[in-house]
């Protein structure tokens, strides 16, 4: 099988794009600081932070309980809601992480 030079270049470009896409997977972790407060930290798999990225606390009825954005240190601390909830880290299309309240680490 013989590759034409253009085919080789296209193959190499596709491989480099797929590798770069994998380098920026969204990551978010939430943990209870105490019985009242939760802290979430967001970022990307390449080690970069996510200051300014939207992080909302949403009730199971889809109402936004705590609207928020990550601070300069890529964290957001909020009071634990009384209703059942999940956390939505939304850095744009394809860069979304949902964390259910049952998955939040206890203090």
Image: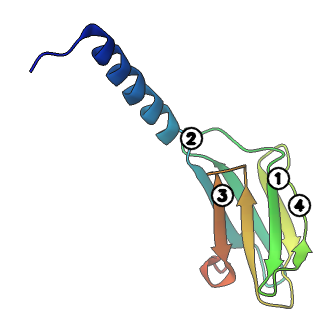
* Residue for badge 2: 24
Judged from this view, the residue extending furthest toward the bottom is 83
Identify the residue under disc 4: 68
Residue lying at 68% horizontally and 68% vertically, measured from the top left: 30
Q: Measure the alpha-carbon separation of dots 3 and 2.
A: 12 Å
Residue bearing the label numbered 1: 70
Is tag 4's residue or tag 2's residue first in the polypeptide sequence? 2
Q: Image quadrant of residue 1?
A: top left
Q: Indicate whether 94 appears above or below 101.
A: above
> Is mark 1 in CB contact (under 8 Å) with mark 4?
yes
The CA distance from mark 4 to mark 2 is 22 Å
Q: Secondary structure at mark 2?
A: loop
User: Residue 77's spot in the image, x, y percent?
Assistant: 84, 65
Q: How is the image coloured?
A: rainbow
Q: Residue at x 54, y 45 (%)?
A: 45
Q: Earlier in the sequence, mark 4 or mark 3?
A: 4
Q: CA distance from mark 1 to mark 4?
A: 7 Å
Neighbour class for label 3 at 10 Å: few (<14), some, many (≥20)?
some
Pointer 3 and pointer 2: residues touching (CB < 8 Å)? no
Residue 73 found in image quarter: top right
Q: Which residue is mark 3?
A: 96
* Quadrant of the rendering where the C terminus is positioned: bottom right
- In the figure, is residue 97 to the left or right of 32? left
The answer to which of marks 3 and 2 sits earlier in the sequence is 2
């Amino acid at each position: 099988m013989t590759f034409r030079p253009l085919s080789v270049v296209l193959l190499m470009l596709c491989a480099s794009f797929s590798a770069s896409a994998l380098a920026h997977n969204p990551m978010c972790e939430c943990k209870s600081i105490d019985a009242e407060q939760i802290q979430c930290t967001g970022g990307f798999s390449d080690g970069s932070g996510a200051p300014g990225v939207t992080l909302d606390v949403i009730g199971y009825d889809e109402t936004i309980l705590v609207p928020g954005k990550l601070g300069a240190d890529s964290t957001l601390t909020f009071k634990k809601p009384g209703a059942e909830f999940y956390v939505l880290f939304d850095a744009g299309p394809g860069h979304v992480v949902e964390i259910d309240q049952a998955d939040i680490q206890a203090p």
